[in-house]
Image (spheres, coloured by chain):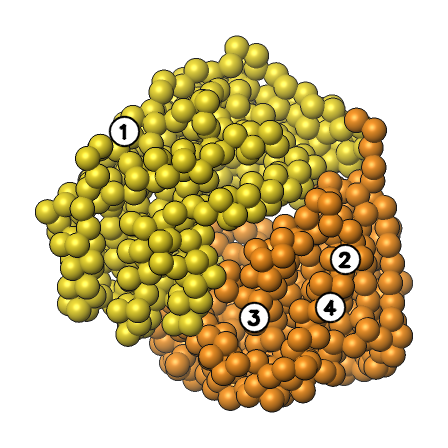
């Protein structure tokens, strides 16, 4: 007798019991810069991040944080932009700058054996950048042209309008127009740079196969040999004011699709309900099998994709839903979105669906820890929210134990559709 | 260096196993040797539409996604002109679920009418979102038929027109499945926290019983060498002018490929590249400029692209692009500059070893190219390229009568 394979039944499976995170070693240099080290992996390479809190937002000079960060690789007292690029590229390294709403950073990916060549370049751009006028002119012109292209995209316009409504005149609501770029002045960049890019405002994170030589190099260059300016960085941010108008329709008569973006100010990671509302968000629109995807893509075929997300900032967060739908079904799609939100407030999430979402979220957390870099990323989430590793214990515990009743209650507390900001770009 | 083992089932399914015990996850990647080049010219976009239908339930499993999410897994897929690739990542303890799901849809689909109807709409919305409702979104719909006159690369994976997708019938879906989706036309890679013996057992159990099916013999019309300059200018609702120049180049398996790919790096990879430095920074003729290759299996495309700065005429900008590439045909690249792009390629290969999924996809793809081991030899081939080879390839490539130029002119508005 042979075994007949039963293909109709799923094989036995196991729950994920435990997630183990690599925690960093911490050293604080005398200049105030802290170094966090994640040592793991087989490849002879490292990722190093220099992370700085942005300076207080100035509505009169809104672009300083982003312009200074973007132009860090555009020239120092001794190296031109071209020479910086040459030196980094020659050693097969990758140097990038990244502007965020709260922090801006410089990232270096380098083979360990070339750190003695690549680290001094980073040091130079952090200490000796000069923001040449010629480079600034190029920056302004090219950013203006990029913006022109972006403004032709409905989803970009929807995101800008939404952010402006939710965050007003703040670093989170920053939506420059073409003219804004003309206000960027070199002397403002220099002043901003000197105050922001100093050791007491820097968190240094190294991840990869970290040998003692690398630590010694970092300690010498960025600990012993890097000093603070007289003026400390002011990294406080003004209080955010939401707009009173909640509905925005920007008509594009030729649109084949309309971009929809809606949502509302929300709790952030520090709030005790944050892990549970992430479960709620996942059910709603946080994964491929979510209710929004099932209804609006997989059942109705109105869109290529729809999703919801929760973002966490220091001052609070936001929940948003975003999609691009056929222009002729835009109204129908918004009706369905509202329907799905109401369902979460009136009916319990069935146990089968809740169990699937729990397992999906645990698998997704485990899968997000692909390599040592991802462990460092998890740390950054905690560190810049002012939290510690207990958060992930609590997070996994809540994912495993949150009940359908809890979710119903949370949906009623947090998903107030009449409080939603709604943006439509296209036809409605 | 990525280590792996290989075996083949009796039905022809090739299996590659890559053990990586640094992760608690497993990957199951299946590459089907079918892409949009295998479509009929009257039914383009079908390979990609079919990829969507692979998620619409199989013969014994009505829902593909839920059981996978239920065990903490995620999946996705993509279609190119050459291949269709499906992948799952999941906690390694639940590896068998991936075998169950993937083997059932290789055995047979559910061929649901409802799924076809919905996915036709979803793909049509994808067509609009990515190709029609974006500035410059239709560039490949326009440029491909200029570069290719005979070969099916003349249409994009999304298809020539929305009508081809709207007209797809369930009978066509069944025929396509029978022709392309069987063990002989697939390469499976299982990687991560897995053991060779375990994978052998699971592969035999779940995939072993699937009939071998018919072998698909590809016989595509090959593109003739180009000897005429091709050009099209369109006025469109785009914010700024844009220039695309596509040149025919050798396919992915040809030895020339390596010199040509490095040439694109010399021209536009990173801020130290020639075109960025000269055209964006020094002469300030462009706001952005790119050079890249399509690593397609048959004769493919080398593309130069740039948006001229305000006040720069298209003619001046186009001449400047040609001047840059013609430099490569006249003078050998200095050794240092070549070393630079070779070093970058080498470290990129090392960095890609940090990602389990990348490794799995690469092993499958190189096996399709002829041997998964080629993946490990790739760096050496790039390092062996000489300045003389680059000059030689540049001379063959950068001929006006090997070019297809597409110009977008921004429509003048009165506001």
Badge 2 or badge 4: first in the primary sequence: 2
Which class describes the residues within 10 Å of circle 1: few (<14), some (14-19), or many (20+)?
some
> Which residue appears farthest toward the top when viewing the image?
A244
Tell me the residue that label 3 is attached to: B265
Tell me the residue that label 2 is attached to: B316
Tell me the residue that label 1 is attached to: A234
Quadrant of the rendering where the C terminus of chain A is positioned: top right
Q: CA distance from mark 2 to mark 3?
A: 23 Å
Q: CA distance from mark 2 to mark 4?
A: 10 Å
Q: Are the residues under badges 2 and 3 in a single subunit? A: yes
Q: What is the tally of numbered marks visible in this picture?
A: 4
| Residue A61, horizontal then vertical, whole percent | 45, 27
Q: Which chain does the yellow colour mark?
A: A
Q: Which mark is residue B322?
A: 4
| Closer to the camera in the image, B316 or B123 | B316
Which class describes the residues within 10 Å of circle 2: few (<14), some (14-19), or many (20+)?
few
Q: Is residue A363 left or right of residue B114?
A: left
Residue in the image at 29% along x and 43% along y: A197
Pointer 4 indicates a residue of which chain?
B
Residue A108 visible in the shown view: yes
Q: CA distance from mark 4 to mark 1?
A: 49 Å
Badge 3 or badge 4: first in the primary sequence: 3
Residue in the image at 22% along x and 32% along y: A231
Residue A94 position (above or below residue B148): above
Pointer 3 indicates a residue of which chain?
B
Whether tag 1 and tag 2 are in contact, CB under 8 A, the answer is no
């Amino acid at each position: 007798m042979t075994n007949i394979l039963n293909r109709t039944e799923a094989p036995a499976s196991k729950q994920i019991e435990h997630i183990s995170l690599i925690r960093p070693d911490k050293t604080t240099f005398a200049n105030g810069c802290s170094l966090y080290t994640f040592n793991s992996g087989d490849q002879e390479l490292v990722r190093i991040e220099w992370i700085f809190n942005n300076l207080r937002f100035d509505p009169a000079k809104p672009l300083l944080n982003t312009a200074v960060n973007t132009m860090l690789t555009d020239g120092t007292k001794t190296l031109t932009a071209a020479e910086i690029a040459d030196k980094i590229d020659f050693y097969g390294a990758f140097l990038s700058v990244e502007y965020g709403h709260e922090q801006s950073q410089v990232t270096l990916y380098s083979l360990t054996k070339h750190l003695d060549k690549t680290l001094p370049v980073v040091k130079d751009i952090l200490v000796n950048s000069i923001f040449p006028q010629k480079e600034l002119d190029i920056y302004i012109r090219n950013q203006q042209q990029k913006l022109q292209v972006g403004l032709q995209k409905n989803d970009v316009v929807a995101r800008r309008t939404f952010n402006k409504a939710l965050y007003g005149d703040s670093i989170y609501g920053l939506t420059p127009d073409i003219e804004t770029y003309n206000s960027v002045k070199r002397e403002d960049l220099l002043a901003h740079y000197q105050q922001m890019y100093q050791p007491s405002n820097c968190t240094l994170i190294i991840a990869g196969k970290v040998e003692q030589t690398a630590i010694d190099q970092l300690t010498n260059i960025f600990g012993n040999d890097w000093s603070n300016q007289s003026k400390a960085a002011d990294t406080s941010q003004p209080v955010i004011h939401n707009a009173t108008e909640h509905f925005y329709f920007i008509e594009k008569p030729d649109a084949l699709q309309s971009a929809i973006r809606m949502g509302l100010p929300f709790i952030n990671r520090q709030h005790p309900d944050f892990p549970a509302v992430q479960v709620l968000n996942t059910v709603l629109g946080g994964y491929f099998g979510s209710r929004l995807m099932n209804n609006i893509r997989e059942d109705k075929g109105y869109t290529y994709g729809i999703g919801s997300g929760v973002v966490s900032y220091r001052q609070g967060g936001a929940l948003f839903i975003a999609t691009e739908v056929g222009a002729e079904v835009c109204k129908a799609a918004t009706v369905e979105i509202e329907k799905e939100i109401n369902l979460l407030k009136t009916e319990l999430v069935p146990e089968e669906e809740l169990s699937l979402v729990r397992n999906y979220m645990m698998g997704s957390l485990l899968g997000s820890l692909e390599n040592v870099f991802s462990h460092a990323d998890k740390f950054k989430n905690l560190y810049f929210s002012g939290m510690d590793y207990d958060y992930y214990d609590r997070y996994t515990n809540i994912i495993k134990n949150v009940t359908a009743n809890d979710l119903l209650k949370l949906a009623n507390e947090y998903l107030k559709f009449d409080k939603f900001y709604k943006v439509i770009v296209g036809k409605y | 260096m990525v280590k792996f083992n290989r075996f083949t089932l009796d039905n022809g399914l090739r299996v590659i196993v890559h053990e990586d015990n640094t992760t608690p996850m497993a990957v199951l990647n299946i590459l089907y040797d079918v892409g949009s080049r295998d479509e009929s010219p009257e039914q383009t976009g079908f390979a990609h539409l079919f990829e969507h239908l692979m998620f619409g339930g199989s013969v014994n499993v009505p829902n593909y996604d839920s059981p996978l999410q239920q065990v903490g897994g995620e999946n996705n897929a993509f279609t190119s002109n050459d291949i269709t690739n499906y992948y799952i990542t999941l906690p390694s303890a639940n590896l068998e679920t991936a075998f169950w799901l993937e083997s059932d849809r290789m055995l047979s689909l559910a061929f649901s009418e409802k799924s076809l109807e919905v996915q036709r709409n979803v793909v049509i919305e994808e067509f609009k979102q990515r190709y029609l409702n974006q500035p410059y979104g239709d560039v490949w719909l326009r440029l491909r038929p200029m570069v290719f006159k005979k070969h099916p690369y003349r249409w994009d994976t999304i298809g020539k027109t929305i009508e081809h997708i709207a007209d797809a019938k369930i009978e066509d879906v069944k025929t396509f499945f029978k022709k392309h989706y069987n063990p002989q036309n697939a390469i499976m890679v299982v990687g991560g926290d897995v053991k060779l013996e375990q994978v052998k057992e699971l592969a035999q159990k779940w995939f072993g019983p699937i009939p071998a099916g018919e072998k698909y013999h590809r016989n595509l019309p090959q593109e003739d060498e180009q000897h005429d300059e091709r050009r099209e200018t369109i006025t469109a609702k785009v914010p700024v002018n844009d220039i695309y120049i596509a040149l025919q180049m050798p396919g992915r398996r040809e030895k020339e490929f390596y010199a040509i790919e490095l040439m694109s790096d010399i021209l536009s990879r990173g801020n130290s590249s020639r075109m960025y430095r000269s055209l964006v920074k020094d002469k300030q003729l462009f706001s952005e400029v790119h050079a890249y290759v399509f690593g397609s299996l048959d004769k493919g495309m080398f593309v130069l692209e740039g948006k001229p700065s305000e006040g720069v005429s298209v003619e001046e900008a186009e001449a400047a692009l040609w001047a840059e590439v013609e430099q490569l045909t006249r003078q050998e690249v200095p050794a240092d500059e070549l070393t630079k792009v070779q070093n970058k390629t080498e470290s990129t290969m090392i960095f890609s070893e940090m990602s389990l999924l990348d490794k799995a996809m690469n092993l499958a793809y190189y096996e399709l190219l002829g041997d998964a081991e080629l993946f490990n030899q790739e760096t050496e081939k790039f390092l062996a390229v000489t300045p003389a080879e680059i000059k030689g390839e540049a001379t063959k490539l950068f001929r006006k009568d090997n070019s297809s130029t597409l110009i977008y002119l921004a429509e003048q508005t009165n506001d």
